[in-house]
Amino acid sequence: MTLIEDLETPAVLVDLDVLERNIARQAERARAAGVKLRPHGKTHKTPEIGRMQLTAGASGLTLAKTGEAEVFADSGFDDLFLAYPIVGADKAKRLLALSDRIRLRVGADSVEGAATLSPAFGAAGRRLGVLLKIDTGLHRVGVAPERALETALRIAELPGIELAGIFTHAGHAYRQETPEGIEAVARSEGEILVAAAEVLRREGLAISELSVGSTPTAAHAMKVVGVTECRPGNYVFHDLSQVSLGACALSDCALTILATVVSVAVPGHAVLDAGSKTLSTDPLRPRASGHGLVQGGASRLSSLSEEHGVVEIGPGESFRVGQRVRVVPNHACVVTNLHDRIHAVRGGRVEAVWKVAARGRVD
Amino acid sequence: MTLIEDLETPAVLVDLDVLERNIARQAERARAAGVKLRPHGKTHKTPEIGRMQLTAGASGLTLAKTGEAEVFADSGFDDLFLAYPIVGADKAKRLLALSDRIRLRVGADSVEGAATLSPAFGAAGRRLGVLLKIDTGLHRVGVAPERALETALRIAELPGIELAGIFTHAGHAYRQETPEGIEAVARSEGEILVAAAEVLRREGLAISELSVGSTPTAAHAMKVVGVTECRPGNYVFHDLSQVSLGACALSDCALTILATVVSVAVPGHAVLDAGSKTLSTDPLRPRASGHGLVQGGASRLSSLSEEHGVVEIGPGESFRVGQRVRVVPNHACVVTNLHDRIHAVRGGRVEAVWKVAARGRVD
């Protein structure tokens, strides 16, 4: 069996003990709240991890792009929701083919977008399940709550489309700097959705799914009465941003980057062989500050170039050329998107090497 | 033949007319200056493009990581320089195998680092060509000029190592906000290297290679008398940062992202299906400002999440759901690292689809 110390660097490690604990905890939380858990697979993009989530009780997976759904369908996943406004006749064709073999739903936030999917399903005498996205404060995509009814009614009339519910993503939780701020965002996320569903139902629309959730807001949002489904993603791995947001402890971070110190030539710095091509330049949330933490100490990565991670050496710490370290990244989801493989480790050993099968499937 | 309009989005496009012009211009510049051109392949990671550079007169390619060299060696490239402090006995083994089939040199900035490569080559009765990295002001890696002699003498004594030259990378040019600032960095880059070589030669070291260069500094640095080689990379594609730095015109940007507008639900914004998983979050240089420009207009991407590119709609412009646009990215090198394929286009047609063969080879 391969040992961690035998791996070439840089390499992505996932600690199985932590991963299993994260998966079990979120599943238990959803069970206790009485909502379905549909984890967002964008964080791992790895069928083996998705399977662990289903085994723990998830009802299916969430993904964003059609290409990701194709990869997971090929791996035997039969219930997927694309929480994204899918647009285009070319995508519709692929969604129709996917619908032949799995239960598939997608997001929409405009009549025009849904209308690009309608003809393919209509012509085939089929109906694509669509959830209307409601903007609950992030102001990225999604219709404003006061415009939800008008849009929902028109989408529901499109041939080949079944309006099955509404969903939201309260990504503005990542801008909150206090637990109270996050809790407030999470509650309003659920409450706005429940209120919007009431309006739509009063007009005769059959809104059966009310889907919310992100890792920082999940615990609160899933408790709002009327919410039926929760879609956190990052919780499988967690990362330094989740620690900063108070959504987890540092010991809950399952994903690290194994790296080697390649230079200490510049005083006060140690340079790792892991840069932005390994860690990405995604900022720390909620406040930008560095590019990762060297595990087991206080030294942080202060800047990245493509193949260099510059560590600002913490007080009382030292590094030597050739030394290996593990880095907790700012944002785990974008790290997996950079790598072909994840090493599943436990107690110094590599138990499995998983292919990040849906990596790069941005279409 | 596939037309651009038939491609699924998001997709990476490279305009062949612009690519060919960029390659020819840099080759002509090096010829005129009388230096070897060894382009950094990290920008494209694509053997087909590396071959175009060789055909135009490049003496070989520069890369950073051992894994990239393995990919290019497999594709028939026989003269590579890894401009990176390679460290580790595991890497030494792979470098030795590479040296069996190609002319290979690597960088070093410490005796300790070079000492990890020495035993494998020494035991095989072979010598690995090493260039000592000199810090000419970036303060990332590289020995300070005043410490170059001491380090060079000790590296040169290592069994299995041949100290063949010195090199630098004046990445601090990317912080300069005026053409004069860039020119000053470029000149000092060359001049510091020439002065360091003189000191080393006086002590009997055979310093034959003096290697400099980046896309913004190349034109000036290659003209410093004594410099033998130049290693710009980004110039094959250019990007919005090079435009901001004055290193090229917008019309010199060969790489764009084809994307689809998926939402206009939030007033003032259009949202593209290309986010940080397509464009990366790398900031604009020298001053951070947005995440790319919609080609042919004034609208810029103001924020990115993984699958969403939020366009701040410019004055007098408008977007509709389903519309396709092309985005000029902040940093082209990290874009290719996110994608498996590049579409080589000319006049609306896709002439070739190239595999980004060395993508993700960070080890």
Image (cartoon, coloured by chain):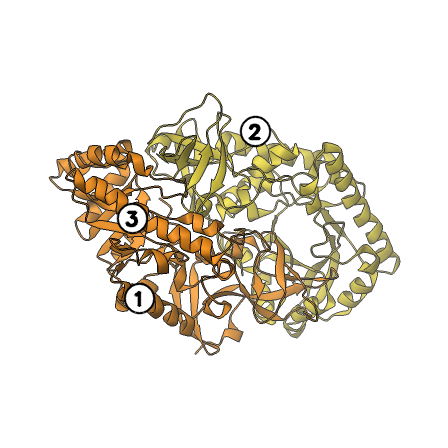
Chain colours: A orange, B yellow
Report which quarter residue A340 is drawn in: bottom left
Which secondary structure lies at badge 3? strand
Q: CA distance from mark 2 to mark 3?
A: 36 Å
Q: Is residue B160 visible?
A: no
Checking the image for residue A3, the label placed there is: none
**Residue flagged by tag 1: what amino acid is it?**
Ala
Q: What residue is disc 3 on?
A: A82
Q: Nearer the viewer, residue A163 or A52?
A: A163
- Crowdedness of circle 1 by 10 Å Cα count: few (<14), some, many (20+)? many
- Crowdedness of circle 2 by 10 Å Cα count: few (<14), some, many (20+)? some
Relative to residue B127, is residue A200 drawn left or right?
Answer: left
Residue A124 point in image, percent of width and height: 13, 39
Q: What residue is disc 1 on?
A: A27
Q: Quadrant of the N terminus of chain B?
A: top left
Residue A73 point in image, percent of width and height: 25, 55
Residue B311 point in image, percent of width and height: 45, 34
A38, above or below A249, in the image: above
Checking the image for residue B250, the label placed there is: 2
Q: CA distance from mark 2 to mark 1?
A: 50 Å
Chain at tag 3 = A
Q: Please tell me if label 1 and label 3 are on a single chain.
A: yes
Chain at tag 2 = B
**Sequence-wise, which precedes: disc 1 or disc 3?**
1
Relative to residue B198, is residue A72 drawn left or right?
Answer: left
A191, above or below A93, in the image: below
**Residue flagged by tag 2: what amino acid is it?**
Leu
**Residue flagged by tag 3: what amino acid is it?**
Leu
